[in-house]
Every structure is written in C-alpha cells, then in structure tokens.
Amino acid sequence: MNLKLTNRGTTLIAAITGELDHHSAEHIIQKLDAEIMKSTTKNLIMDFSKVNFMDSSGIGVVIGRYKKIQRLNGKLFITGINDKISRIFNISGLLKLVPACENIDDAINKM
Amino acid sequence: MNPINEVKLEFISKSSNEAFARVVAAAFVSQIDPNLEELADVKTAVSEAVTNAIIHGYENSSGIVKMECKLYTNAVEITVIDEGKGIEDIEQARQPMYTSRPEMERSGMGFTVMENFMDKVEVVSEAGKGTTVKMYKVFKSVGN
C-alpha cells in the first residue's frame, strides 16, 4: 500500500495504491490526517483508481475523513472506484453521502 | 457430500496476516477455477472474518486465528476461528453499521459484507471462549 498526496490550491488529493484493508487503513489514516490538519487543506479528493483490493475498512476510512472535511466546511469526493469497490461502498450507503466522480479532474471541476 | 480437498491454517493475530489469509483462501479455491469476481468475493469475505478475529476476538492482543477451507466440486466452505473474547449478542453484532469499536473508525459492515459476498454465513460464539464464523459459497461459473 502506498499513499501519494498532492495539493491543488486548497484541495488535497490522496491517491491510494495497492490493498486497502484494516492493516493498511491505519497507516493511511495517520498520514492523511496529518495533512488534513494543515491550514492549507479545505477539500479532499480520495482516488481509488489504483486500489486493487478493498474490504469494509475502506468505508471507515472514507467516513472518518468525511467528518473531518465537514468540520472544515470543505467537500469530499471519491474518484476512480471500480465495480468491486463501488459494491462495498453501496452496501453501506456511503455513496449517498460522498459523491463519486470518474476521475480527479472531474472532481476538481465540481469543487 | 464429501469435500474434494481441505486445508487448515493457523497464524498469529497480526494485522499483516489479513492479506496472507485471503490470498491463501483465494489460491486454494483457484483449484476449481471460479471466475475472478467470485475469487474477489472470497478474498473480501475472508478479509472481513479474519479482521474481526484480530480486532474484536483478540482486541489486537496476541492469539491464534485458525482458518479451515473445504473445497467441493463447485463450492467452498471457509471457517475462521478465534479463541478470544467472544460475542455476547450475535444478532446485534450482525446488524449493519453496528460496531463495538467506534473509536477505531470501523464501519460496522463486516458481517454485512460477508453475507453479501457469500451464500451462507453462520456465527457461533460464546463470551470468553471465542467465535467461529462459517461461510459457504457456490461458484455459479463452475459446473457440477
């Protein structure tokens, strides 16, 4: 698992690569939250296009970040979710709360 | 019906073994050649069951998690066993969004995902003795 963080203005882009399970979620949360804490961050895009496995730990990661971004009055979008990831998010009703966009550019246009 | 093959695995309750267990289950099931989607379903369900054993059964302390897989001509039965804390109210634990560990940012969707991705999920548990989760899946892509 790898997490790549980039900034576009006040939007933080977090691209997750590899497997997202309970083991890797702890690392992602730590690294991501440290960056969200920085005063430059308002909005967040979480990109899943390079995630090749995800279990329900992914739901917790997104909901936890959603709560943090809400406190900053920012917006959260998720991008690049394939059918398998979408199925897990759908079971939890997460996609009603956090909108999904096809790719990072789409999400930035909707900010 | 007798299984055509069986495997038993024991590992310590380290979170890095979650990936190991699901890859073992998928590799074992591959013998009967299910499609990729069915394999992914098995991996996801095993990941949920093993994560539960580690986080809830042993509460991140050290213990042994057992996984037993029985392969049939077109199906698999996977049992994940811990000898940890046990579940006092199984019905409550199986409810979507219920988690006994909200501080860990768990979604409470583990059992719901298992139920969605497998055909049958049975849970036997006793407080103080541990939990056994038995999951069964028929592979529709595999002929009888």
Image (cartoon, rainbow, N blue to C red):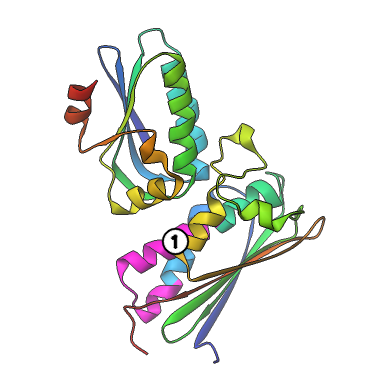
Question: Image check: B108 left or right of B125?
Answer: left
Amino acid beneath label 1? Lys
Assign the magenta stretch its main secondary structure: helix
- Chain holding disc 1: B
Q: Give the residue drawn at x 18%, y 30%.
A: A106
Above-or-below relation of A102 to A91? above
Q: Give the residue drawn at x 45%, y 73%.
A: B28
Q: Secondary structure at mark 1?
A: helix
Residue A33 x/y as whole percent: 47, 22
Look at the image and give the residue range highlighted in magenta.
Answer: B28-48
Residue A44 x/y as whole percent: 34, 23
Q: Residue furthest right?
A: B128
Q: Dividing the picture into quarters, in which one does residue B39 lie? A: bottom left
Q: Which residue is mark 1?
A: B43
Question: Image check: A77 left or right of B54?
Answer: left
Query: In this figure, what is the number of numbered marks?
Result: 1
Residue B29 x/y as whole percent: 43, 74
Above-or-below relation of A68 to A106? above
Residue A36 x/y as whole percent: 42, 18
Q: Give the residue drawn at x 45%, y 57%.
A: B44
Above-or-below relation of B78 to A77? below
User: Is B35 part of what is drawn in magenta?
Assistant: yes
Q: Give the residue drawn at x 51%, y 60%.
A: B114
Q: Residue furthest front?
A: A96
Neighbor class of circle 1 (other Cα within 10 Å; few <14, some 14-19, many 20+) is many
Q: Dividing the picture into quarters, in which one does residue B134 lie? A: bottom right
Above-or-below relation of B105 to B140? above
